[in-house]
Amino acid sequence: MGKLMILLYFILSLFPADATTNDMCKFKDTTLGIKKLDFNVKRGAMAAYLTDGREIIVPVSMFPDIKHLSRKQREDWMIMDDQYFSFEALSRIYSVKDLLRL
């Protein structure tokens, strides 16, 4: 496990379990989370599979840090508390709200 991932898990462990649950993205009485990311759906795009069964596809250009990652680095993603995602090569943490531009 990389140092960044250990640090991210440590930071998330500082918050009570219900703090992240209450902060989940609510959209018309639906709690949204992220199940999986996929960069192989279309060139220059990222697919996010949500916990409610939907799939959203966004241009990678929305996330300049991710756009500059190599293909191998993009495959090294992690999802935390169904709400946040990051990459071993990045120090930034993104949320489901970033995907939806809320």
Image (cartoon, rainbow, N blue to C red):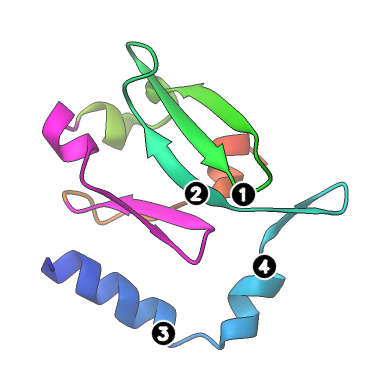
Dot in front, 3 or 2: 2
Please rate how many residues cluster around mark 3, counting C-alpha atoms within 10 Å: few if below 14, some from 14 to 19, many from 20. few
Front residue of 40/4: it is 40
Task: Report if the CB atoms under discs 3 and 2 are less than 8 Å apart.
Answer: no
Q: Earlier in the sequence, mark 1 or mark 3?
A: 3
- Give the image location of residue 92, x and y in percent: 32, 53
Numbered tag placed on residue 13 in the rendering:
3
Q: Is residue 77 above or below residue 101?
A: below
**Residue sitting at x 39%, y 18%:** 41
Magenta span: 69-88
Numbered tag placed on residue 23 in the rendering:
4
Q: Earlier in the sequence, mark 4 or mark 2?
A: 4
Q: Marks 1 and 2, how far apart in space?
A: 6 Å
Please rate how many residues cluster around mark 4, counting C-alpha atoms within 10 Å: few if below 14, some from 14 to 19, many from 20. few
Q: Is residue 94 above or below residue 10?
A: above
Q: Is residue 90 above or below residue 24?
A: above
- Name which residue type carries label 2: Lys
Task: Report if the CB atoms under discs 1 and 2 are less than 8 Å apart.
Answer: yes
Helix, strand or loop under label 2: strand
**Residue sitting at x 68%, y 45%:** 52
